[in-house]
Amino acid sequence: MKKSKDPGPQFAVCVDNAGYPASLELHKIYRVLPDVDAARDGDLRVVDESGEDYLYPANRFLMIELPKTVEQALLKAS
């Protein structure tokens, strides 16, 4: 049985905040939490400006890979 590798922290940049101006800042990097069911429905679970995680349409974000030092800094800040 093959084990799935933990992808570690994931991040995305907001490219469309229409309808969510208080919750999402355009061009800001957000932490993405794993949610298989949400992904199946075309959504991402994102820790937004409230500090809580909510579902948003995935097409409002672009997934990005960051250098480990940047990841660590973002995780420490949250």
Image (cartoon, rainbow, N blue to C red):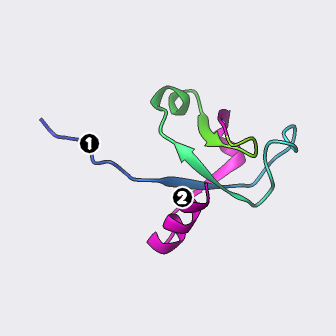
- The stretch of residues the image draws in magenta is 52-78
Is 75 located above or below residue 59 in the figure?
below
Could you tell me how many numbered marks the image carries? Answer: 2
Marking on residue 19: none
- Of badges 1 and 2, the one in the foreground is 2
Q: Secondary structure at mark 1?
A: loop
Foreground pick, 3 / 41: 3
* Residue type of the residue flagged with mark 2: Leu
- Residue 12 is situated, as x and y percent measured from the top left of the image, at 61, 54
Residue at 32%, 48% (x, y): give it: 6
Residue at 54%, 61% (x, y): give it: 76
- Magenta span has 77? yes
- Image quarter of residue 55: top right
Q: Name the side, left or right, on which 8 lies relative to 78.
A: left
Residue under label 1, please give it: 4
Residue at 72%, 46% (x, y): give it: 60
Distance from label 1 to label 2 (Cα)?
23 Å
Is 40 located above or below residue 16 in the figure?
above
- Magenta span has 49? no
| Disc nearer the start of the sequence (1/2) | 1
- Residue 49 is situated, as x and y percent measured from the top left of the image, at 75, 46
Marking on residue 75: 2
* Residue type of the residue flagged with mark 1: Ser
Residue at 59%, 37% (x, y): give it: 45
Mark 1 nearby-residue class (10 Å; few <14, some 14–19, many ≥20): few
